[in-house]
Structures are given as C-alpha cells and as structure tokens.
Image (cartoon, grey):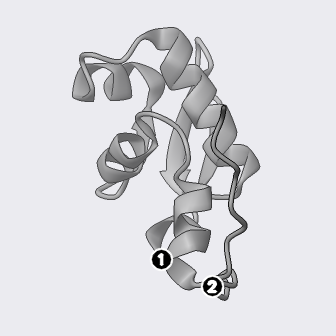
C-alpha cells in the first residue's frame, strides 16, 4: 500500500533578490559568460577561447538567452567581415 502524500503546512517565502538573480542566471555556463564579460566586451570567438569546454551551440544559446533577459547587449561592429561584440548591460553589471 503506497504512503499517503501529506500537504505542506509551510507558506511560500516572499520573493527575495537572490531568487530573482537566480532566475536571470538560469542555465549552464551563464555565470561563466557573465564573468568573462565583466572585464570588457568580448567577441564570440574570444569567449570560446575563454571558456574552452563550452560548445559553440551552447555558447550561442546562452548568449541569446542572456540577451533576451536584458543581461547582455549584442553590438554589431561595422567591419569587413562583420563581427559582433557582447557586453554587460547595467543589469548584468549589477
């Protein structure tokens, strides 16, 4: 006979700043990307060298996620060939 599931009598804690921060940093490698962008803007290839164990696919996904959350800013550099630099926003620096 299976055990009966008991209801939790503890109320949920209020939303704290740490919980909000963890929502922004959700995903593997996101803290690493933020760490390497904290010093200066970096290009995609430079981030691949900085974080050698990350695949290009995962790095691209993390950059897109962090950009959509407003943590980093993607800037197209007008050069030949065109390149892209990533930098932290005010939210990312915070």
Could you say which is closer to the camera, residue 31 or residue 38?
31
Q: Residue at x 68, y 62 (%)?
A: 6
Q: Determine whether the residue tagged by mark 2 lies in a helix, strand or loop.
A: loop
Could you say which is closer to the camera, residue 14 or residue 57?
14
Label placed on residue 94:
1
Residue 18 position within the rendered picture, expressed as x and y whole percent measured from the top left: 49, 76
- Say above or below: 33 vs 94: above
Could you tell me if residue 24 is visible in this image?
yes
With 51 as the anchor, is 61 left or right in this view? right
With 52 as the anchor, is 18 left or right in this view? right
Report, in whole angstroms, how far the alpha carbon at label 1 lies from the one at label 2. Answer: 24 Å
Give the quarter of the figure containing the N terminus: top right
The residue wearing badge 2 is 13
Earlier-in-chain disc, 1 versus 2: 2
- Say above or below: 15 vs 6: below
Residue 29 position within the rendered picture, expressed as x and y whole percent measured from the top left: 40, 35
Q: Residue at x 38, y 48 (%)?
A: 31
Q: Picture quarter containing residue 77?
A: top right
Q: Residues within 10 Å of mark 1 (few under 14, many from 20)?
A: few
Q: Determine whether the residue tagged by mark 1 lies in a helix, strand or loop.
A: loop
Residue 27 position within the rendered picture, expressed as x and y whole percent measured from the top left: 53, 38
Could you tell me if residue 76 is visible in this image?
no
């Amino acid at each position: 006979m299976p055990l009966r599931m008991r209801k939790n009598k503890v109320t949920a804690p209020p939303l704290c700043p740490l919980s909000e921060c963890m929502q922004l940093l959700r995903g593997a490698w996101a803290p690493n990307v933020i760490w390497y962008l904290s010093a200066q803007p970096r290009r995609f290839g430079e981030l691949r060298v900085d974080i050698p164990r990350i695949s290009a696919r995962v790095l691209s996904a993390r950059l897109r996620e962090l950009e959509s959350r407003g943590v980093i800013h993607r800037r197209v550099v007008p050069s030949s060939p065109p390149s892209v630099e990533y930098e932290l926003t005010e939210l990312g620096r915070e």
